[in-house]
Amino acid sequence: MGVIIVMDTIRNYIRLVISEIDRSRRAPPEKKLRVFDFDDTLVKTGSMIHVTSGNGDTFDLTPGEYAVYAPQPGDQFDYSDFEGLVDPREIGWTVKILRSIIAKGGEVVILTARGNPDPVRLFLQQAGLPEIDIIALGNSDPQRKADYISGRIEADGLQHVEFFDDSYKNIEAVKRLKPMFPGVDIIARHITH
């Protein structure tokens, strides 16, 4: 009698495991997106933002300096250095993360304030990375990056977004999305080096 109970228990356990496997095969995979900034996140360049102040003084800002710069009334900005690649140097540890995600088949986007995706594409080719989506916003307003991510969450039903950026302003804009999407895991990683 004890053998029959054990056999029934084993059969029931096997049925349970098979049904869990079937359910997991039918369950859609979690929809994830990793979003990387370009300048000062994946690459350091010699590109500068040229500023002419309201009183006519001129000075240059690195992308890192620009990220924390508080514009003054009358400032005019020249972003022409960002139409190309000026002395690009890979930021090894963040590029390693990018390579790892690509190797695992994860969806990746480069989201840049640059107006032209071609320099980013050139860098990816030179680094031996495959073609991935590059979104060139042509605008440095942090809200534009948050709007792009918000749009992707809504359009694609994303469940997980990981955002990598050197600009604290951009990080804060993306963090403000969390209350709007309570069921979405939104991680904003501030890149410093």
Image: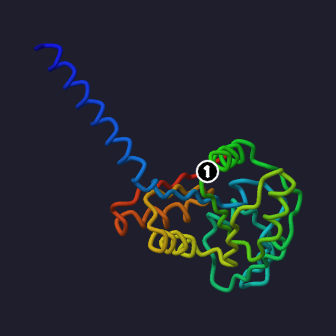
Q: Is residue 179 above or below residue 5?
A: below
Question: In the figure, is residue 158 to the left or right of 126?
Answer: left
Q: Nearer the viewer, residue 54 or 2?
A: 2
**Residue in the picture at 32% in, 35% down:** 17
**Residue in the picture at 60% in, 52% down:** 106
Q: Quadrant of residue 116?
A: bottom right
The residue beneath circle 1 is: 191
**Residue in the picture at 13% in, 13% down:** 2
* Relative image position of residue 151 (x, y in whole percent): 50, 75
Crowding at mark 1 (Cα within 10 Å: few <14, some 14-19, many 20+)? some
Q: Is residue 13 above or below residue 7?
A: below
Question: In the figure, is residue 40 to the left or right of 14?
Answer: right
Q: How is the image coloured?
A: rainbow
Give the position of the C terminus as an image quadrant.
Answer: top right
* Relative image position of residue 134 (x, y in whole percent): 70, 68
* Relative image position of residue 169 (x, y in whole percent): 55, 65
* Relative image position of residue 48 (x, y in whole percent): 80, 67
Furthest residue in direction top, as rendered: 2
Q: Tell me the SS state at disc 1.
A: loop
Please state which amino acid type lies under the numbered disc 1: Ile
Q: Nearer the viewer, residue 43 or 121?
A: 121
**Residue in the picture at 39% in, 47% down:** 24
Q: How many badges with numbers are in the image?
A: 1
Q: Nearer the viewer, residue 167 or 101?
A: 101
Q: Quadrant of residue 10?
A: top left
Q: Nearer the viewer, residue 107 or 15?
A: 15
Give the position of the N terminus as an image quadrant.
Answer: top left
